[in-house]
Amino acid sequence: MIRRLIVSYVALVGVALAAFTVPVAFTLTSQLRGDTEESVLREATTMALLLGDGDAPAREALARMAGAYADETPGTVEVATADGRSAMPPLPLTARPHDAAFGDALERGRTTVDWGSRFVWGPELVITVPAYARGEVTGGTEGDDDGGAAESGDGDGDREGETGAAAGGTTGGTGEAAGETGEGVGGTVEADDADDGGQAVGSAGPADRIVGAVRVRYATADLTDRLWRIWGFRAILAVGVLAVAAGLGAIVARLLTKPLRQLNDMASRFGDGDLTARSPVTGPQETRTLARTLNQGAERLDTLVASQRIFVADASHQLRTPLTALRLSLDNIADGVDDEFVREDVEQATAEVVRMSRLVSGLLVLARAEAKVSAPEPLALRELVEERLKVWRPAADERGVTIVLTGDADDRARVLAGAGNLDQVLDNVLSNALEVSPDRGTITVRVETGGPEEAVLEVLDQGPGMSAAEQARAFDRFWRGQGLTGRSGSGLGLAIVKQLVTDDGGTVTLRDASGGGLCVRIGLRTVGDGTRWISPRPGAPRSGG
């Protein structure tokens, strides 16, 4: 959920950045293109005015202006005459005087603008402008020069003044020469984007005579660098803003989801059996209400379960005394009765009392196991198993049953188990195995290493075994299979085993033993070499039946 909140927050910030920065970047790009086109077109038109003068001083001024333009800008100037074959000395002839742009300028008087690409621009901007004979322009040509007026006439002095004014306006990029530009091309210059290559077209009046054309090739490398700076700066800024947004989003998301994580922790602990788990009542109103509701439900459930366990434990404890007294009474009656039929009835009653006593003891053990889960402690597995087998071997010897300990686990193998839990597990499993084993049979106890984090304890008997359906129900309370614990079993032994093993984080399963019988497999968690371990203490056999 935290990841989704962060992604959503970053996506929202990204959309906002794109909506703001992308249009601005496009606007700046368009402005850069327009300013460059306007500047180059103005210079080309001014040079066309000089070419239209036709005299030597104007041509020399045009040559000097073209050289200065090439030195100071990334552009070059090309000139062609009206026939498209020879240039006006000392200006060089264009490499392609018969291309379409020169044709439009010389034949139709059209000004063309070609950016070389429909996407932003190509490697160079090419502008071709027609030049008209100034003495033949209808209505004459007027332009301001230092606040004065200059008219086209026959005198050389007037023509030189006009030429100087045009050259001065070209070098500065502004001034009166630019004013002469519009009049020099017949009074109108129109530019609009065409579909093929982004050309701009201008036209002149029908009475004007075209004497040549001027072409300016302007390299766009500097424009491309400026374009990358425009977009690159905004891209880096966007990445930085998104990174900051991701960091702030992570902090905000963790703060918003903290109450939910606390509720999840409480639910996990509750699912693991810790009925005392409660969630802090924090966060927004909705989560506080949910936390209070869950805490109230958990409190009520904990109270009900605790009451039930207390009742079972108290009832089991209280029943043990009258059952013990009843058994003693039956034993006294059996000692004082000579009638064989009465003695048989008394023995049957005594057997039922014994079974009931074992059932009550099992209920008490199970209630105590469920009521409190002790913390697992490191225990030496093989040593504990050997101690329990010493306790059970005398009972097995009475029936001629042999108990064999095998397995590759050594004395250093240690497992995690609650205090007394593993002893009780072994007592229940060995009690069941001994009860179903035939006389002079064998019970095999195998201790092995099941993996880097698991030790396996298996108890195999030679009894009648269980079917698959019986193995599935064997851990149910009060369920007794055919021949598993005989008629005297309480049906709580394996239920107690599963409860204790599960509390310690282990697993217990049943399967058929090779050669017949049943195999009880118990998987236990192991500990590292640096963990403290506790040596087991021997005790009397304990079994839940």
Image (cartoon, rainbow, N blue to C red):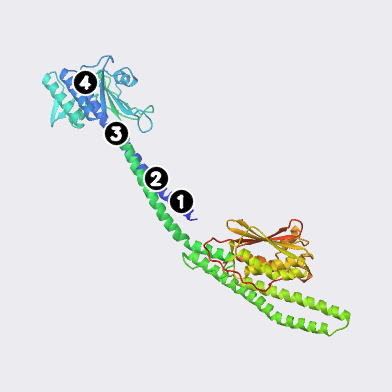
Q: Amino acid at mark 2?
A: Ala
Q: What's the distance in space between the residues labelled 2 and 3, CA to CA? A: 26 Å
> Percent x, y for residue 126?
31, 26
> Where residue 7 is drawn, which disc sits there?
1
First in residue order: circle 2 vs circle 1: 1
Of helix, strand and loop, which one carries label 3?
helix
Location of residue 316 (image quadrant): bottom right
Q: Rounded to the nearest whole Å, what is the CA distance between mark 3 and mark 1?
A: 38 Å
Q: Residue at x 45, y 57 (%)?
A: 253
Q: CA distance from mark 2 to mark 1?
A: 16 Å
Q: Residue at x 66, y 71 (%)?
A: 366
- Disc 4 marks which residue? 51
Q: Point out the frontmost of discs 2 and 4.
A: 2
Observer-side mark, 1 or 4, equals 1
Q: Earlier in the sequence, mark 2 or mark 4?
A: 2
Q: Are marks 1 and 4 in contact (CB under 8 Å)?
A: no
Counting residues from the N terminus, which is met first, the one under dot 3 or under dot 1? 1
The residue that mark 3 highlights is 222
Classify 10 Å Cα crowding around label 4: few (below 14), some (14-19), many (20 and above).
Answer: many
